[in-house]
Image (cartoon, grey):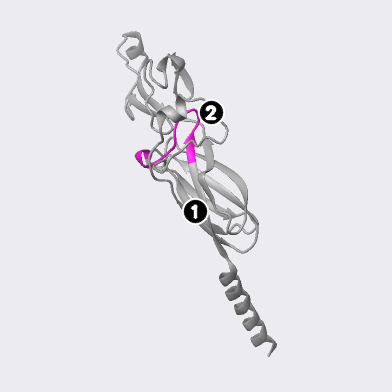
Amino acid sequence: MRIAYSIFFLIFMLFYGAIHATPTKIVIRVKAKDAKFIGTGIGGAAVIVRDNLSGLVLSRGVTSGGSGDTKRLMQTPVVRYQPQTDSATAKYIATVDIDEPTLVDIEVQAPLSRRGASIKGSTQLLIIPGKDILGDGIIIELPGLILDILSPYTHQSLTKESFSKGGFVFRVNLVMLCGCPIAKDGVWDANDFEVKAYLKKTGNGLAIMN
């Protein structure tokens, strides 16, 4: 009898909690440091929302949308309460079902299409049932750049002779984490960046290239 009562009570509490849980929406965005938002064009950002106490995953998804307005984000002085985004700016809308104020961990990783450059970030937030967080929402900023090595190619043989003869070419392509281009006299001015390559073979330094 006690076992039956216990099972009934457990089912009742689960059912009661499901009925009284309130769907609450959270807009989550991921932004590259000193650049724009990470959206569909660069694969988006993975988002996971967890209950801090239990570790239960409440929501997961990927940001989608555009990288935002360049003039608004990069060329307009920041004014308090002025939105940084519009309806087309990349975001993920998490819907969490909670029946009491809940501390959540929000974890992101981006960009998904360039795993070699992807980086993680996180924040914590107390969510109140029924109190949606919309508009710009929660913005998590990630530092970093996307680097593609164009030359030398993978497993290309490099010798000291190739350096001495001046026949070695080292080329890279570097863009912001949101995929925005770095160019001479551009919004992200190449003149403001310093790039060096440290070349090693079996742990021994071969050269430092600017």
Residue in view at x 39 percent, y 25 percent: 174
Q: Looking at the picture, does residue 1 appear above or below residue 117?
A: below
* Residue 194 shows in the view: no
Q: Considering the image in quadrants, where does the N terminus appear?
A: bottom right
Q: Considering the image in quadrants, where does the C terminus appear?
A: top left
Extreme top residue here? Answer: 165
Q: Nearer the viewer, mark 2 or mark 1?
A: 2
Judging by the rendered image, the residue that carries numbered circle 2 is 78
Residue in view at x 56 percent, y 36 percent: 81
Residue in view at x 62 percent, y 83 percent: 8
Q: Position of residue 185 (x, y in %)?
A: 38, 15
**Side of 12 relative to 2 (left or right):** left
Q: Secondary structure at mark 2?
A: loop
Say which quarter of the image contains residue 114. Answer: top left
Amino acid type at mark 1: Ala
Which segment did they paint magenta?
30-42
Q: Position of residue 89 (x, y in %)?
A: 41, 40
Asked whether 115 falls inside the magenta stretch, the response is no
Residue in view at x 44 percent, y 30 percent: 72
The label on residue 94 is 1
Say which quarter of the image contains residue 169. Answer: top left
Amino acid type at mark 2: Val
Packing grade of label 1 (10 A; few <14, some 14-19, many >=20) is: many
Q: CA distance from mark 2 to mark 1?
A: 27 Å
